[in-house]
């Protein structure tokens, strides 16, 4: 709601723009203050406040406040609150977490479900075609390389042949061996890495489906939009390069990978995956060294049995 109003400001009359700026400065107060107070703080008349509400698509002030209250009660900040040098630990916790939650909610509202559906379909098809040698390759460098490794781990658990490649030379060799039916998932926050741009071009020429997770408007995103077998999953979150900032973009990329993994798991079918995952969990439990309470209770007085319990 607030993003739409911010985008509409240039088209509003000057008086209504002042009302909009008051709203964006403190949405919570705007939702509770009477019309007279709102008019006084904006230096406009009371009818101007009502006209502003109608200009941005609402029936009037009452309807506008009702919708606004629903937004402000989500409990996340409306504008990113940067960490300050004198912030205490408690302030840092609130700001960092609120910023991450707000970014995730913005992505939830902006995500292109049609593109996500295409990506899931291509990945699931590659997963089904393993017997024909189909592969899923995840490419990323730096922080995005860590996301690629997480993606490989998630798809590996689904029984899908997947590889994470973060070295530039290895990426070129890997992309060169792709073929139609394979999937190349390229992850980049900036979308400006020369290595990844080259890999996207190579994978496209080899006929593989190229799924790009990057910022919209970046060179990598433009290349994805130009290719017929490319799928762009745009994730936009500008990082603060002038001071320490949490890597929210990495969290968003991990979130996208989780969405894709869940979608692919559903496409592959729970009847096939559930027994495999249950067996995997069982084998992992046997590797644990800490004894469960049941085994400890059953082995009281028997030090040898306790020490050998996995």
Image: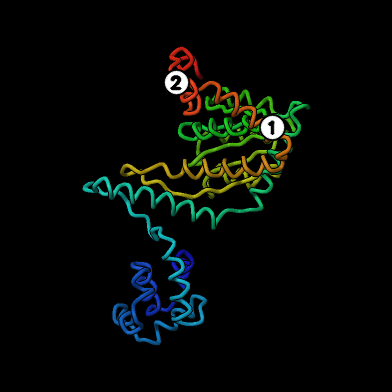
Residue 51 in which image quadrant = bottom left
Secondary structure under the numbered disc 2 in the rendered image: loop
Q: Residue furthest top?
A: 304
Residue 305 percent coordinates (x, y): 49, 15
Q: Which residue is mark 2?
A: 300
Q: Residue furthest right?
A: 132
Residue 159 percent coordinates (x, y): 67, 30
* 3 to 64, vertically: above or below: above
Decide which of tag 1 and tag 2 comes sooner along the chain. 1
Q: Which residue is mark 1?
A: 275
Residue 81 in which image quadrant = bottom left
User: Residue at 44% across / 51% down in the picture?
Assistant: 101
Label 1 Cα crowd, 10 Å radius (few <14 / some 14-19 / many 20+):
few
* 216 to 5, vertically: above or below: above
Q: Residue furthest front?
A: 301
Q: Which mark is residue 199?
A: none
Residue 170 in which image quadrant = top right
In the image, taking residue 210 as reference, residue 306 lies left or right, namely left
In the image, taking residue 61 as reference, residue 267 lies left or right, namely right
In the image, taking residue 128 as reference, residue 215 lies left or right, namely left
Q: Is residue 211 visible?
A: yes
User: Residue at 34% across / 67% down in the picture?
Assistant: 25
Label 2 Cα crowd, 10 Å radius (few <14 / some 14-19 / many 20+):
few
Residue 165 percent coordinates (x, y): 56, 27
Q: Residue 98 versus residue 78: which sits nearer the camera?
A: 98
Distance between the alpha carbons at the discs numbered 1 and 2: 34 Å
* 73 to 84, vertically: above or below: below
Mark 1 vs 2: CB contact within 8 A: no
């Amino acid at each position: 709601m607030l993003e739409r109003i911010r985008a509409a400001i240039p088209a509003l009359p000057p008086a209504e723009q002042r009302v909009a700026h008051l709203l964006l400065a403190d949405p919570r107060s705007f939702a509770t203050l009477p019309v007279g107070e709102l008019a006084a703080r904006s230096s406009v008349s009371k009818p101007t406040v009502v006209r502003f509400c109608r200009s941005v698509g609402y029936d009037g002030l009452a309807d506008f406040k009702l919708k606004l209250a629903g937004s402000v009660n989500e409990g996340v900040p409306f504008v990113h609150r940067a960490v300050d040098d004198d912030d205490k630990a408690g302030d840092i916790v609130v700001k960092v977490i609120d910023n991450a939650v707000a970014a995730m909610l913005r992505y939830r509202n902006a995500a292109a479900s049609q593109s996500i559906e295409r990506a899931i379909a291509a990945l699931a098809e590659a997963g089904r075609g393993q017997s024909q040698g189909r592969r899923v390759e995840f490419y990323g460098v730096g922080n995005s390389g860590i996301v690629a490794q997480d993606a490989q781990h998630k798809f590996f658990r689904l029984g899908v042949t997947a590889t994470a490649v973060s070295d530039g030379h290895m990426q070129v060799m890997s992309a060169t061996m792709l073929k139609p039916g394979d999937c190349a998932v390229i992850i980049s926050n900036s979308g400006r890495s020369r290595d990844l741009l080259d890999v996207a071009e190579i994978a496209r020429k080899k006929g593989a489906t190229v799924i790009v997770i990057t910022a919209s408007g970046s060179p990598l995103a433009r290349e994805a939009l130009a290719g017929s077998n490319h799928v762009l999953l745009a994730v936009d979150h500008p990082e603060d390069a002038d001071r320490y900032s949490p890597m929210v973009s990495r969290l968003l990329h991990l979130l996208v990978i989780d969405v894709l993994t869940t979608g692919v798991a559903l496409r592959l079918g729970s009847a096939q995956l559930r027994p495999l995952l249950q067996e995997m969990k069982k084998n992992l439990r046997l590797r644990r060294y800490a004894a469960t309470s049941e085994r400890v209770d059953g082995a009281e007085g028997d030090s040898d049995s306790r020490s050998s319990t996995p």
